[in-house]
Amino acid sequence: MPRKKKRADELTTEEAMKKMFPKKVREEAKKAAEKPRSPAHLSIDKKDKG
């Protein structure tokens, strides 16, 4: 007897990503998530403090 499918709220982030997106897109998203933020947001913070 086959296993029941997990409901959407029971999926882990990795399982949901694997189910919804092709491998190429997942790899690109992972690379983008690992990149540090751009230094542009730092200049905005400095203006608010001064």
Image: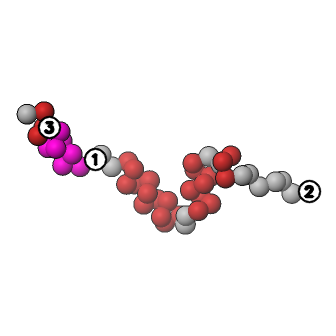
Q: Residue at x 38, y 48 (%)?
A: 34
Under circle 1, the secondary element is loop
Looking at the image, is mark 2 or mark 1 earlier in the sequence?
2
Amino acid type at circle 1 is Arg
Looking at the image, is mark 3 or mark 2 earlier in the sequence?
2
Under circle 3, the secondary element is helix
Q: Are marks 2 and 1 in contact (CB under 8 Å)?
A: no
Measured in 3D between alpha carbons, the distance from the residue under mark 3 to the one under mark 1, in whole angstroms, is 19 Å
Nearer the observer: mark 3 or 2; the answer is 3
Amino acid type at circle 3 is Asp
Q: Is residue 39 visible?
A: no
Residue placed under numbered mark 2 in the picture: 1
Looking at the image, is mark 3 or mark 1 earlier in the sequence?
1
Q: Residue at x 72, y 52 (%)?
A: 7
Residue placed under numbered mark 3 in the picture: 48
Amino acid type at circle 2 is Met
Residue placed under numbered mark 1 in the picture: 37
Q: Residue 6 at what x, y percent from top left?
A: 73, 51
Q: Quadrant of the N terminus?
A: bottom right
Q: Quadrant of the C terminus?
A: top left
